[in-house]
Amino acid sequence: MQGYNMKIFKIIYYIFIGLIALVAVLLIVSTFEIPGNFKAMTVLSGSMEPAIKMGSVVVVKPAGDYKINDVITFGEMTKTKTPTTHRIVDMRVTEGVPSYITKGDANNAPDTREVLKKEIIGKVLFSVPYAGYAVDAARKPIGFALLIIIPALLIIFDEVRKIYAEIKKKKQITNHEK
């Protein structure tokens, strides 16, 4: 029975370490620019549900042109302002300059402001549901500390357990030889 418990512990351990690694990768990807002009961003509202869940990470890339039904991320990206991810529902061209009418899938009406091409960060290529919650938590000091401390404690615990098992095994061998 103890062997079965150890197998379950190891499975949980490796899943947890894998999740921590995924969060670390997503944190790095969302903080630094990815080669190829890809950007990863967190969706903070439910306006695009069910297509994109609140708390998802979306990967966007600028496109040459945008068309109706494309899901785009647009707006300023600063410490106080977050970009918006919505679907293009209509488009207008005024004096040769395209502007896009956007709408969140869960919203009843289109956005009140039209979006110019220069404001678009990129077209959404894919999303990772709920990963944004972990990335946002990891951006905070306590979350980042936990991202380091919890895996370290797990590794220390696992190593102490292995050392204890070896000591126990050597004592049994020593007692058996007497």
Image (spheres, rainbow, N blue to C red):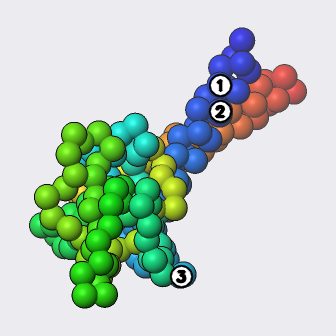
Label 2 and label 3: CA atoms lie apart by 34 Å
* Amino acid type of the residue tagged 1 in the rendering: Ile
Question: Hey, which quadrant is residue 1 in on the image?
Answer: top right
Q: Which residue shows up at 65% across the image and 25% down it?
A: 8
* Amino acid type of the residue tagged 2 in the rendering: Ile
**34, 69: nearer the viewer:** 69
Q: Marks 3 and 1: in contact by CB < 8 Å?
A: no
* Amino acid type of the residue tagged 3 in the rendering: Pro
**122, 65: nearer the viewer:** 65
Question: Hey, which quadrant is residue 60 in on the image?
Answer: bottom left
**115, 83: nearer the viewer:** 115
Extreme-right residue of the structure: 177
Q: How many marks?
A: 3
Mark 2 sits on what residue?
11
Q: Marks 3 and 2: in contact by CB < 8 Å?
A: no
Q: Secondary structure at mark 1?
A: helix
Extreme-bottom residue of the structure: 95
